[in-house]
Amino acid sequence: MCTVGVVGLGLIGGSLALDLKRRGFAARTLGVEADSVAAEAAHTIGLVDEVVDLDTCIQEADIIVLAVPVGVAVKLATQVLDQVKDGQIVIDVCSTKEQICREVQYHPRRGQFVCTHPMAGTEYSGPWAAQPGLFDGRACIFCDSEESNPQALKTIEDMYAVLNMRPLYMRSNQHDIHTAYVSHISHVTSFALALTVLDKEKDEKHIFDLASGGFSSTVRLAKSNADMWVPILTQNHDNVLQVMDTYIEKMQAFRDAVATYDEARIRELIQEANKIKRILR
Amino acid sequence: MCTVGVVGLGLIGGSLALDLKRRGFAARTLGVEADSVAAEAAHTIGLVDEVVDLDTCIQEADIIVLAVPVGVAVKLATQVLDQVKDGQIVIDVCSTKEQICREVQYHPRRGQFVCTHPMAGTEYSGPWAAQPGLFDGRACIFCDSEESNPQALKTIEDMYAVLNMRPLYMRSNQHDIHTAYVSHISHVTSFALALTVLDKEKDEKHIFDLASGGFSSTVRLAKSNADMWVPILTQNHDNVLQVMDTYIEKMQAFRDAVATYDEARIRELIQEANKIKRILR
């Protein structure tokens, strides 16, 4: 039982604080939230025991979780490590890992930092979006874990075990390549789909009336928050760009097959795409 | 209470037969299925009271539902209308409407044909995918309904009311424009996403391990069946092509903003896409 301090009481930070308290991992939870409206909401909902300032959080928490957009987390990581004492642990939960790992690489307290990516979420954000059970059954990636102290790593592994997450281990640069393919590109394709439909369907009632379950699920991620996604796309620039180029090529191949009424080629492309069934339910 | 004959016992035809019988609209349901394995399955599951041949279905059913891929339905519509007697009704449930409406336009029994698109489905196909309640709460589009006899139209409106569908009315060409934006393009973007990921992630275990809920929902439609989608994309050629071109433009705009680290422009695009929240839950 320990004190967990969460910096950033949004979807991820808020959900994490909720379950760590409910499930008895944390005796006490502290929250830091720069936005006063969100701070008030987190207090009202009761996401944490107390909303405090960053200095208080750093002084009192055994584990400090950085759950802010990755652009902010990169700066905050060093700043927080500068202030912690022996035995305290700092973790981040961001969606891109190479830059934040590079940032703390030579910090004298690097061993007290554990770099994690709990792969869970919804298209909603802010303290109102936090929910119990968000992480159950999902994967949590630990990056460059050999650079964390074994004891700090063990504590955080135990913490994610309480959240029922499956641990995976990889290098931060490998993480960023894989997530570009399996997470980042699907956000970009949803944004582009929403832009296309909003651009062409001037009559919003038609979109509402005709939106099938298929359209809704494909465009769902287009509701995702810009504060979170702008830094992800720029920090993971090289990988994201390469995936987008491949994606545009595939789309163009599909377009050309449709343009020429090439039924055999359209069938071939669809059946190739169907192979995703082998992997995903 | 009447006899409903369903030609094509897949996801849509099978689900429709199930609920019309369960809910008392049909006293008796007949099914026609060209594929012998699917016919056997439909019989085993009990999707219809009897699996019969097409001629028997046309002789005995009061309402004949064409629930086959649109390429087949276009040919079958005329053939079935040629054989029906006064009082019988023929409907189709396909995803593209302009061509099938044009096909039957001057048929002497055009009044007995009702052109409908119940907008429901999943990414699965075949009799095994049929399920009760598939249509509840979704929209059903009636196309060119003024060309159907008022009595035939009324009967089919009542039938879809039993399935708890919201009726919408539009011209078949308008239908095809709107569905290109709100349904067809999201299938193509999912196919392209699956192709991209399968092409680049040679290690399928990574896809499985890392696939977040977001990726799964965005790529879900890539499991859709080629037999159904090849004719949709070619029959709705002009509209689909125009939407694909717009989509590629939007994707390219996004790509260029990422390529130049233009954070303001990425933010602008994401926030524009976020407007889909105004329309869809």
Image (tube, coloured by chain):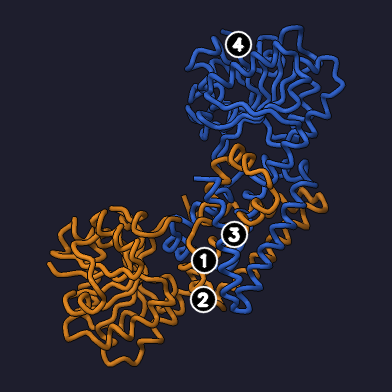
Chain colours: A blue, B orange
**What residue appears at the point 76 percent right and 8 percent down from the top-left corner?**
A85
Q: Residue flagged by tag 2: what amino acid is it?
A: Asn
Marks 3/4 same chain: yes
Residue to which mark 4 is pinned = A3
| Chain hosting mark 4 | A
Q: Is residue B183 toward the left or the right of residue B146 in the image?
A: right
**Chain of the residue displaying label 1:** B
The chain letter for the residue carrying disc 2 is B
**Image check: A101 left or right of B9?**
right
- Label 3, on which residue? A272
Residue, x 78% and y 41% (percent of image)?
A: A235
The kind of residue on which mark 4 rests is Thr
Evaluate whether residue A34 shows in this view: no
Mark 3–mark 4 Cα distance, whole angstroms, equals 50 Å
Q: Residues within 10 Å of mark 3 (few under 14, many from 20)?
A: some
Q: Which residue type does callout 3 highlight? A: Glu
Question: Could you tell whether A246 is left or right of B42 in the image?
Answer: right
Q: Residue at x 41, y 86 (%)?
A: B102
Indicate the quadrant containing the N terminus of chain A: top left, top right, bottom left or bottom right. Answer: top right
- Where is mark 1, residue-wise? B184
Mark in front: 3 vs 2: 3
Q: In x, y percent, where is residue A114?
A: 72, 21
Q: Quadrant of residue B108?
A: bottom left
Disc 2 marks which residue?
A: B236
Do marks 4 and 1 share a subunit?
no
**Quadrant assignment, res A81:** top right
Q: Is residue A85 above or below residue B159?
A: above
